[in-house]
Image (tube, rainbow, N blue to C red):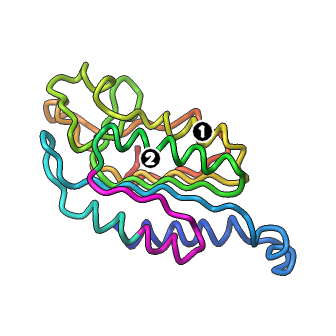
Amino acid sequence: MKQVIILFILLLLNSALQADSRALYVKRYSNENKVALVIGNNKYQKFSKLRNAINDARDMKDVLTQQGFEVLYKENANRKQMKQIIRTFGRKIRNGGVGMFYYAGHGIEVNGKNFLIPINTDIEEKDEVEDEAIPINLVVNKMRSSNNRLNILVLDACRNDPFSKGVGGGLAQINNAKGMYIAFATSP
């Protein structure tokens, strides 16, 4: 799955950043601000530990760095660390250009809203998710208010819902992200 996502990102970046004339592209976008936030969470305390999220996040960080992005990177982030790095990302993308967010770890949907799960989250009941997890809308709102030329959001989230009693699980579609490219590792 990791290779498919990386290939998708490279193709997306290539097509989104191309112009009719290479010279025009270089003149117009060569100094453009490109900032990415990459978070990989493996070592969960209450949710099941993941094997590949950190490896996927590291690979994505390397690819984005090679593509000229300034990459903010965090492994095994707790709630406070995730909120802080998302705030920093929000400030950095305000300069315009291209913003990209990549998350590998647990994600969950509750009442039509998507949440990212920090490693230290203490969720025992479904009604606690909104208070303990990070709403994906926090990232979406930072990107929307940036006025970037291009925003890309990739959720490579393990999305097994521990509260669903074997029924469904998954992430909800993100409808408030007009003008953003959004990719899920699996369909929402």
Q: CA distance from mark 1 to mark 2?
A: 20 Å
Residue 57, compared with residue 131, is above or below; it is below
Which residues lie in the magenta part? 60-76
Which residue is labeled 2 in the image? Answer: 85
User: Toward the viewer: 30 or 48?
Assistant: 30
x, y percentage for residue 106? 27, 46
x, y percentage for residue 168? 25, 36
Count of numbered badges drawn on the protein: 2
For the point 73% across and 53% down, which residue is it? 149
Q: Residue furthest bottom?
A: 23
Is residue 66 in the magenta section? yes
Could you tell me the amino acid type at mark 1? Ala
Residue 100, compared with residue 19, is above or below; it is above
The answer to the question of whether label 1 and label 2 lie on touching residues, with beta carbons closer than 8 A, is: no
Secondary structure of the residue carrying numbered label 1 = loop
x, y percentage for residue 45? 13, 43
Secondary structure of the residue carrying numbered label 2 = helix
Q: Which mark is residue 152?
A: none
For the point 14% across and 52% down, which residue is it? 49
For the point 43% across and 57% down, which residue is it? 38
Which residue is labeled 1 in the image? Answer: 177
**CA neighbours of label 2 inside 10 A, class few (<14), some (14 to 19), many (20+):** some
The answer to which of marks 1 and 2 sits earlier in the sequence is: 2
Q: Nearer the viewer, mark 1 or mark 2?
A: 2
Pick the quarter of the image with the N terminus: bottom left
